[in-house]
Amino acid sequence: MQQVNSRGSFLCAQACLPYLLQAPNPHILTLAPPPSLEPKWWGPHTGYTLAKMGMSFVTLGLAAEFGPQGVAVTALRPRTVIATDAINMIPGVDAAGCRTPQIMADAAHAVLVREAAGFHGRFLIDDEVLAQAGVTDLSGYAVDASRPLLPDLFLD
C-alpha cells in the first residue's frame, strides 16, 4: 500500500503538473482523510493508517507547492463506508449499511467544477460537499435506506 497510495499520489501529480498548468481549471483530487495523529486511528491498523495519512500529507504538500500556481489540490473522504468490492472482503461488514459509490462520484464532480484558483489544501467530506451544492436528500445513495449507515474511518 505504501508504494501505491502516497508514492503514487505524489509521482502522478508531479508527472501531470505541466499539463495541469495549461488547463483552464486545474484540479488534483485525492481520496484521502483529513490528517490525524489521533492514536485511535493508528493503533488498530498502523500500516493502513500510514498509507491513508501519507496521501493526506501528500495533499497538504502539493497544495502548498501547486496552489500558488493556480492548481487546486484537495482531498475528499466519504462520511460513511462505501459499498465497493473491497467491502465484501472484510469480515463483519454488511454492505447494506453502506452508501453507493455514486455519492463519491457526485461529490467529486461538485469539487472538480469549482473554480480552482484559491481552492486548495482542503479536506472535504462527501455529504458536506453535496449540501453546499444543494443536495440535501442523501437517501438515494444508501444501499438499504432502512439500515443505519456505517461511519467511515478517520473522521472524528
Image (cartoon, grey):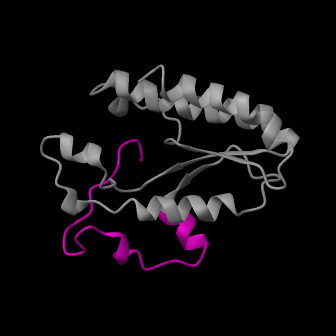
* Magenta part, dominant SS: loop
Q: Position of residue 111 (x, y in %)?
A: 64, 59
**Residue beneath the point at 19% across and 75% down:** 146
Q: In the depicted view, which residue is nearer to us: 37 or 31?
A: 31
Q: Position of residue 140 (x, y in %)?
A: 36, 76
Residue 25 lies left or right of residue 88; in this view the side is right
Q: Is residue 135 magenta?
A: yes
Q: Which residues are magenta?
A: 127-156
Where is residue 83, by image quadrant?
bottom left
**Residue at image coords 34%, 76%:** 139
Say whether residue 150 is magenta.
yes
Position of residue 38 relative to residue 132, above or below, is above
Q: Residue furthest left?
A: 92
Which residue sits at x=36%, y=27%?
Answer: 48
Quadrant of res 64: top right
Quarter placement of the N terminus: top left
